[in-house]
Image (cartoon, rainbow, N blue to C red):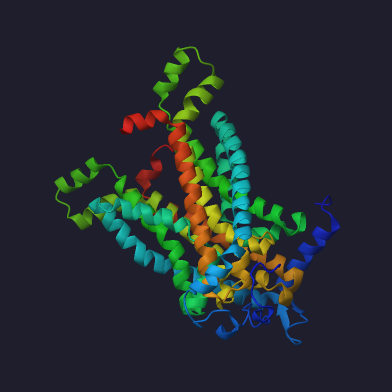
């Protein structure tokens, strides 16, 4: 693992019992010893977190886009062919259940260490949430609306893209928001796959509270930002809901 | 299966050997690692800390969620906690707990319960809220007390939603219990995280065991959900 923080090398202790890197607080560059948060150090070193944060955003964005593409395709298939629903639900459920850290290392023989492995595992985790919400959203479209569309002469494909999917957008985006926020949090574990992200500085100096608070705080901020962006997209994509609400 | 490349087959074989027989390790000073005894020990620890954290989550979240759901108040709180809970970065949570409060079973249990509380609270609230108000009014009309309404009418109807929350909580908890060795609780994750002690075979063995443990728990909870769902609800077409 590459050191991303401007800490003296002496701060990295030997690997002891279990995994803990033993380090005493006086070897850490914090004036107030065991303080919860050292503002001085944070101010001087905040720049070191930029590149892990950017990596984190990239990991999440790629994973969610990939997950969405697959889950959306599965949902459209299962929407048309009902018999596909039980196997798809089971398959995505199994992928959702396998803990990410385990998944990273199960993929190791196939994809090795690195970003690809992390992205596969993280996007696999998003499948169930997005798939289920898309199916539910499509199923909630009233039959009368579909009948009306058919009466106006729309084909099945037109009904799907112009009527059902727009009406299902709130549910689909809701699933996307849940998946994205969860993935931002989970991506801190991508460090175990050797994929960097904000887990990198956390893991590197795991006894240093200021470091954990900065990196963890940034992860939460990224989650909130993603959530706000997706919420804005949902409002833009469903203008009719705004007029109803007002 | 013959299509599998040789290295993959060899590593899977190595992982299973690691699970069954203790192997020598060059960093433990002659002590062997792995083997069925250690596998059982670490599995039980991971199960223990998972179940303790789940019990703590239920203890905290269930009464609050059921109460708020029954009263129909605090929607912002119940939903908000659920949304905020998803944003908690797992690695930062475990690391912060260990660094700020200390290592050990109790602290890890509390940290993991923090991940379990939000989905249980939100789903308990939503599950109770979505019970048809006319059913509740009918129950009140035939003279049931508020507690009876909750226990005999709302709770049975909320079981599917509530159990979805419990399952999500369990998945979060057991997954994060994998990194509990960072906070001094040696779970199966130790095989994964501590590669220099357990070697490549240990890492793959750990990953397989953790995945199996999570799937087993999920399967058990799915079974529990079926048992807890009243027969009347099962007859309803899906």
Residue B184 horizontal/vertical position (percent): 56, 78
Quadrant hosting residue A86: top right
Residue at screen point 62% across, 48% down: A63
Residue at screen point 34% across, 49% down: B126
Front-most of B215 and A242? Answer: A242
Front-most of A155 and A5? Answer: A5
Tell me if residue B153 comes above or below residue A69 in the rendering.
Answer: below
Residue B199 horizontal/vertical position (percent): 75, 72
Residue A39 horizontal/vertical position (percent): 49, 72
Residue at screen point 47% across, 24% down: A163
Quadrant hosting residue A22: bottom right
Q: How many marks?
A: 0
Left or right, B80 with reference to A15: left
From this viewpoint, is residue B102 visible?
A: yes
Quadrant into which the C terminus of chain A falls = top left
Quadrant hosting residue A30: bottom right
Front-most of B217 and A28? Answer: A28
């Amino acid at each position: 693992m590459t050191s991303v923080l401007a800490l003296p090398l002496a701060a990295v202790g030997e690997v002891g019992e279990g995994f803990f890197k033993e380090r005493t607080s006086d070897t850490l560059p914090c004036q107030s010893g065991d303080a919860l948060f050292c503002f001085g150090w944070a101010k001087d070193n905040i720049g070191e977190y930029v590149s892990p944060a950017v990596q984190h955003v990239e990991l999440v964005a790629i994973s969610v886009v990939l997950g969405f593409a697959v889950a959306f395709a599965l949902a459209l298939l299962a929407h048309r062919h009902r018999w596909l629903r039980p196997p798809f639900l089971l398959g995505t459920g199994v992928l959702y259940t396998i803990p990410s850290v385990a998944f990273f290392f199960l993929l190791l023989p196939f994809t090795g260490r690195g970003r690809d492995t992390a992205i596969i595992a993280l996007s696999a985790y998003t499948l169930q949430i997005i798939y289920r919400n898309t199916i539910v959203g499509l199923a909630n479209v009233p039959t009368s609306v579909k009948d009306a569309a058919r009466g106006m002469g729309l084909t099945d494909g037109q009904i799907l893209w112009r009527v059902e999917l727009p009406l299902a957008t709130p549910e689909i985006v809701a699933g996307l928001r849940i998946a994205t926020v969860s993935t931002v949090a989970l991506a801190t574990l991508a460090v175990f796959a050797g994929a960097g992200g904000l887990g990198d500085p956390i893991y590197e100096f795991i006894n240093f509270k200021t470091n954990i608070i900065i990196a963890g705080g940034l992860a939460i901020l990224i989650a909130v930002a993603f959530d706000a962006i997706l919420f804005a997209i949902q409002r833009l994509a469903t203008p009719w809901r705004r007029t109803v609400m007002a | 299966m013959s299509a599998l490349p040789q290295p993959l087959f060899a590593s899977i074989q190595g992982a299973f050997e690691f699970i069954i027989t203790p192997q020598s390790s060059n960093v433990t000073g002659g002590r062997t690692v792995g083997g069925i005894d250690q596998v059982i020990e670490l599995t039980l620890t991971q199960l223990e800390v998972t179940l303790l954290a789940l019990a703590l989550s239920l203890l905290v979240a269930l009464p609050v969620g059921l109460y708020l759901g029954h009263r129909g108040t605090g929607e912002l709180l119940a939903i908000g906690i659920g949304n905020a809970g998803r944003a908690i970065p797992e690695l930062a949570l475990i690391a912060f707990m260990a660094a700020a409060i200390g290592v050990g079973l109790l602290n890890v249990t509390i940290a993991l319960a923090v991940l379990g509380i939000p989905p249980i609270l939100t789903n308990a609230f939503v599950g109770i809220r979505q019970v048809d108000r006319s059913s509740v009014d009918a129950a009140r009309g035939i003279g049931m007390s508020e507690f009876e309404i909750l226990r005999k009418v709302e709770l049975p109807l909320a079981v599917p939603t509530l159990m979805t929350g419990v399952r999500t909580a369990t998945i979060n908890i057991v997954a994060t219990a994998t990194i509990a060795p960072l906070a001094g609780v040696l779970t199966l994750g130790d095989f994964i995280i501590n590669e220099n002690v357990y070697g490549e075979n240990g890492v793959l063995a750990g990953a397989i065991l953790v995945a199996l443990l999570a799937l087993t728990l999920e399967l058990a909870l799915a079974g529990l959900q079926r048992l807890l769902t009243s027969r009347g609800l099962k007859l309803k077409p899906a």
